[in-house]
Image (cartoon, rainbow, N blue to C red):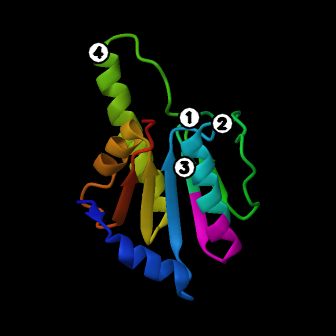
Amino acid sequence: MAVLVNRHDLVACIYSQVVMKITLVIGSMGSGGAERVMSILANYWATHGWNVTLLTFVDSNASPFYQLEPQIKLQQLGIYRDSANPIAAIQAGWLRIKTLRAAIAASEPDVVISFMNTVNVLTILALWNLDIPTIVSERIYP
């Protein structure tokens, strides 16, 4: 089951000398505000020596809008697709969860941070019984 991390614990880690392995999850790295915040966080932690993996749901031919530090491991999972009908949508949802779970497990993170509502739900489902601390963030105006 996904565990929610106390924000004070995360702040303590940020300001300590501990090197963290962090996995960030977002639908895409387009030009939106959540994507901007995600790039700022990823770049900050990468330049401070943390191992950062950034997972997106888009295909590998999608270039990030915001600059990312070269040491960030960007993995574009290619699981963002429209479904033709409700049955196909359910099948695609399970495939997204399975693919996301495998990618997160392979990154061996100390913590997972997910942005955006649909991605947050899929991330929580993908982390079921993995015992990895998880933070989800909603970025919605207003």
- Residue 108, which numbered label? none
- Residue 78, which numbered label? 1
| CA neighbours of label 2 inside 10 A, class few (<14), some (14 to 19), many (20+) | few
Tell me residue 69's x, y (percent). 74, 60
User: Tags 4 and 2 in contact by the CB under 8 Å rule?
Assistant: no
Amino acid found under the numbered disc labelled 2: Ser
Residue 6 counted in the magenta span: no
Determine the residue positioned at 72% across, 54% down.
Answer: 68
Pointer 2 or 1: first along the chain = 2
Pointer 1 or 3: first along the chain = 3
Which residue is disc 2 drawn over?
31
Residue 68 drawn above or below residue 17:
above
Which residue is disc 3 drawn over?
55
- Is residue 99 among the parts visible in the rendering? yes
Amino acid found under the numbered disc labelled 4: Pro
Pointer 1 or 4: first along the chain = 1
Which residue is disc 4 drawn over?
86
The residue lying furthest to the front in this view is 142
Rendering quarter of residue 17: bottom right
Tell me residue 23's x, y (percent). 50, 60
| Callout 2: SS | loop
Separation of disc 2 and disc 1 at Cα? 18 Å
Q: Nearer the viewer, mark 4 or mark 2?
A: 2
In-image side of 87 versus 105 (left or right): left
Residues in magenta, as a range: 44-53
Amino acid found under the numbered disc labelled 1: Gly
Q: Nearer the viewer, mark 2 or mark 1?
A: 2
Pointer 3 or 2: first along the chain = 2
Separation of disc 4 and disc 2 at Cα? 30 Å
- Is residue 76 among the parts visible in the rendering? no
